[in-house]
Amino acid sequence: MFAQFVQFLLAGITVGSAYALAAVGFTIIYNTSGVINFAQGEFIMLGGMLSVALAATGMPFPLALLLGILAAGAVGLLIEKIAIEPAGNAEVVSLIIITIGVSLAIRGVVQVWLGKGTHTLKAFSGDAPINLLGATLLPQSLWVLGATMLIVIVLAWFFGRTLLGKTMLATSYNKLAAQLVGINTRKVLLLSFGLSGVLGAVGGVLIAPITYTSYDAGIMLGLKGFVAAVLGGLGGGMGAIAGGLILGVAEALTAGYVSSSYKDAVPFVLILLILFFRPQGMFGKKLAERV
C-alpha cells in the first residue's frame, strides 16, 4: 500500500510540475496586465510539437528542443505585438476574448501544418525505470522535477536581483506608479508574454516524452494551469508552483484510489471550492478596502 501511494505521489508531482510552469506563465501575464492569457496552453503544445517537428528533420536533439522553446517564446512576443498591443486600453474582458481567439488560431495552424496525429519526443536519458521506495520512476520524471526546481531558482534570482525583473515586479504591484517613475510598461508586458511562452514551452518539452503531444494537447494543460494559478492566488511564482503540485497530486490520488474517469474533474471541483470559500486562493492575501 505504501509503495502504491508513493507511486501515485511521484506521478502527481511529475505532471503537477508541468501545471506549475503553466501557472507561473498565467501569473506573470496577469500581474503585469490583469489579463488571463488563455493561449498559455498553446505555448505548452507548441514547445512539444515544434520540438518534435525539428527533431524529425535530423537536427541534433538538444538544438531541436532549444529552438522549439525559443520559437514558442517568439510566438508569445508576436501575440502581444499583433493582438494585445493594438487593443490598447480595451477592457480586460475584451483582452481575454482576444487570447481565446489567438488560442484557437494557433491550434488551427498547427493542426493544418503538423496534422492531427499524436507525437512523442524521445526520453532525455533513456526509459529504464528507477526503483524508489518500492515505486518505479521514469528518468524523464527526474528531468521534469529538476528543471522545475531550477526554473524556480532562476526566476527568484531574476525577479529579486536583476533590474529588468524588478521593473516587472514594480509593474505588477502598481502599473500607474511604475509609469510615473519612467518604467515602460508596454515593454514589460511584451517581455511577460515572451517569458510565459518560454516557460510553457519548457513544460511541454519536458512532459512530451511521458504524456505525448498533439495539436490539441494544450487545451486541458492550459485549463489545469489556470486552475493551479487560481489555487496559488495569482499573486506570485511560489503560489503558482504550489498550486500546480497540489493539483497534480490530487489528480493522481483520485485516479489511483477512485477512478481515472474522474481525474479530469478534479481541477474543476477544486476551482469551485476555491472560488466559494477562498476567492483569493490558498496562498493569496485577503484584500481589504477602506471606505
Image: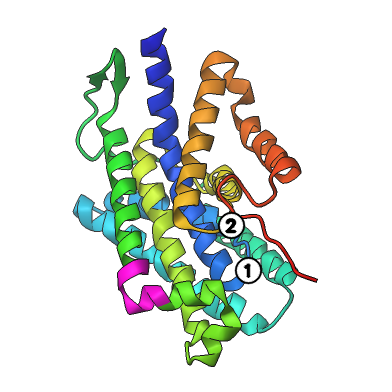
For residue 163, which quarter of the picture?
bottom left
Whichever of callouts 2 and 1 sits on the residue coming sooner in the sequence is 1
Amino acid type of disc 2? Answer: Gly
> Residue 229's x, y, as percent?
56, 51
Give the residue at mark 2: 108
Q: Is residue 120 visible?
A: no
> Residue 235's x, y, as percent?
55, 59
**Height in image: 289 above or below 206?**
below
- Outermost residue on the right side: it is 291
Q: Locate the C terminus by quadrant.
A: bottom right
Closer mark to the observer between disc 2 and disc 1:
1
Q: CA distance from mark 2 to mark 1?
A: 27 Å
- Outermost residue on the front side: it is 290
Q: Which mark is residue 34?
A: 1
The residue lying toward the viewer, choosing from 246 and 131, is: 246
> Residue 134's x, y, as percent?
29, 12
Q: Secondary structure at mark 1?
A: loop
Query: Which residues make up the magenta segment?
Result: 159-166
Q: Is residue 245 left or right of residue 126?
A: right
* Label 2 crowd (10 A; few <14 / some 14-19 / many >=20): some
Residue 266 shown in magenta = no
Query: Could you tell me which residue is drawn at 71 percent across and 37 percent down?
Result: 273
Q: Locate the N terminus by quadrant.
A: top left
Amino acid type of disc 1? Answer: Gly
